[in-house]
Image (cartoon, rainbow, N blue to C red):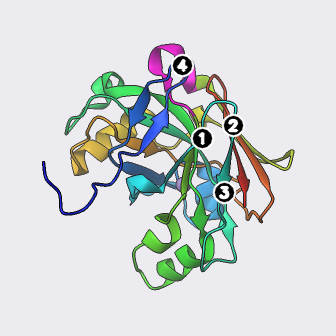
Amino acid sequence: MDYVLTPPRITSAPVAGTARRFPVHRIYCVGSNYQAHAQEMGRTGREPPVFFMKPADALLPVESGEVGRLPYPSLTHDFHHEVELVVAIGEGGRDIPPAEAQRHVYGYAVGLDMTRRDLQAQMKKRAGPWCIGKGFEYAAPIGPVTAHAQAAQIGAAVIALNVNGVERQRGAIAQMIWNVPQIIAHLSAAWTLAPGDLVFTGTPAGVAAVERGDLLEASVTGLEPLRVRVV
Ligand code: MN
């Protein structure tokens, strides 16, 4: 193929225990998927799921054992952390029933849905799209993907985030309003899922702002942790 420009590189995430990579197609996100966070954002938690996307090149892959560098973004004075379980799709499909969702999952990772909260709030007020609050460069830090077979207890996992050694967020994967098979069913009714898609599954309560110099340590039991420093 002869292109008029150098084609963009393929975004990828590390895979735990191997030098091979997980190539990224799309990044889907679920909003308000934990009751307490839905309430802190002014929702009841009983609404149907809200989906939004980040561009694939918003991913900030962090290698095993490393601390990623997360640049403080432009235009915001309220840069928020949201620790999330990320589902890595290995097999695509559409209209996937919840009972069949599991075989579409390659694995799981720890992610951060970083958010320019002030810009998102402005857009909510104007009933505008959230892109400027959610879809900027480096807005999706992610740790290594662990294959499903090595993460069989994910449904019983604890999800947490520490900032500078102090706990900010803690929840249980079992507290999700929409569980992973239900999310895949809803998503695949609206879009055709493809191998390489990532799904950020929502954050527990406790979202708050970070500043330059802060060290974020995100964890989900059974997965490799994700560490980034805001620079
Ligand atoms: Mn989120």
Does the residue tagged 4 have its C-beta within 8 Å of any atom of ligand 1?
Answer: no
Residues 65 and 210: in front is 65
The residue singled out by tag 2 in the image is 66
Three-letter amino acid code at the position of disc 1: Val
Callout 4 touching callout 1 (CB < 8 Å): no
**C-alpha gap between disc 3 and disc 2:** 19 Å
- Part of the protein shown in magenta: 144-155
The residue singled out by tag 4 in the image is 151
- Picture layout, residue 67 above or below residue 114: above
Does the image show residue 179? no
The residue singled out by tag 1 in the image is 62
Q: Is residue 66 magenta?
A: no
**C-alpha gap between disc 2 and disc 4:** 21 Å
Callout 4: SS: loop
Q: Earlier in the sequence, mark 2 or mark 4?
A: 2
Residue at 41% over, 32% down: 22
Mark 2: give few (<14), some (14-19) or many (20+) Cα within 10 Å.
few
Where does residue 150 sit, x and y in percent of width and height? 52, 15
Callout 2: SS: loop
Residue at 67% over, 33% down: 225
Where does residue 44 sit, x and y in percent of width and height? 55, 60
**C-alpha gap between disc 1 and disc 3:** 16 Å
Residue 81, numbered circle: 3
**C-alpha gap between disc 3 and disc 4:** 24 Å
Report the side of 8 relative to 116 (left or right). Answer: left
Q: Earlier in the sequence, mark 3 or mark 4?
A: 3
